[in-house]
Image (spheres, rainbow, N blue to C red):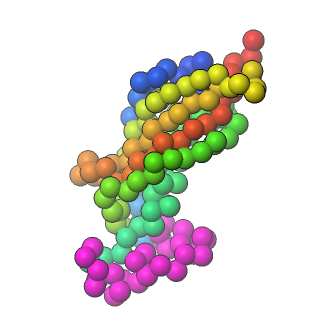
Amino acid sequence: MSGLYYEEFEVGMEFNHALTRTVTEMDNVMFCAMTHNPQPLHLDEEYSKGTFYGQRLVNSLYTLGLMIGVTVAETTLGTTLGNLGMTDIRFKNPVFHGDTLRTVTRIKDKRESKSRPDTGIVTFEHFAYNQRDEEVAYCERTGLMKKREA
């Protein structure tokens, strides 16, 4: 288990996650298929040529999931009891097939749980950037975190 316990997080702490991922056409097509999303912006190359992007876009929910997934090993692996919410999700720039994404996490806030004395609540800010260092995604996520056993 490599996740951190509630007590180990500090407000302002930053993680520059070493794991990066190049997004492929198959990632995008499979994600759309698994989520029953037939949006031609993601799947139809000819249709997408006629948009102002000129090419297919990677499904934004795939981008969100990838951004958060990359953070798990260094932050919450085995130490979280679950997500409590995600807010302020935004996609500042599009992601295209072949883009390589990297993720940064900052700890925005933390507090003791009022109803569960063995847990705390941590607010994470996640940022994803492409190979040109353009921000492509942002999310504020709140997690219910285990405390160390006494």
- The residue closer to the viewer here, 52 or 114, is 114
Assess whether residue 39 is covered by the magenta stretch: yes
Q: Indicate the quadrant where residue 55 lies.
A: bottom left
Q: Is residue 19 visible?
A: no
The image quarter containing residue 53 is bottom left
Residue 133, image x and y in percent? 26, 47
At horizontal 56% and vertical 19% (from top left) the residue drawn is 8
Residue 84 vertical position relative to residue 148 in the rendered view, above or below: below
Tell me: 5 left or right of 42.
right
Which residue: 28% across, 85% down?
50
Q: Name the quadrant of the C terminus.
A: top right
Seen as rendered, the residue at the extreme bottom is 46
Q: Is residue 81 above or below residue 91?
A: above
Q: Is residue 73 above or below residue 34?
A: above
Q: Quadrant of residue 83?
A: top right
Rendered position, 76 above or below 9:
below
- Residue range corresponding to the magenta coloring: 26-53
Q: State whether the magenta stretch is mostly helix, strand or loop.
A: helix
Left/right of residue 94 with respect to residue 112 in the rendered view: left
Visible residue check, residue 66: yes
Residue 142, horizontal then vertical, whole percent:
57, 38
> Which residue occupies 60% across, 76% down?
36
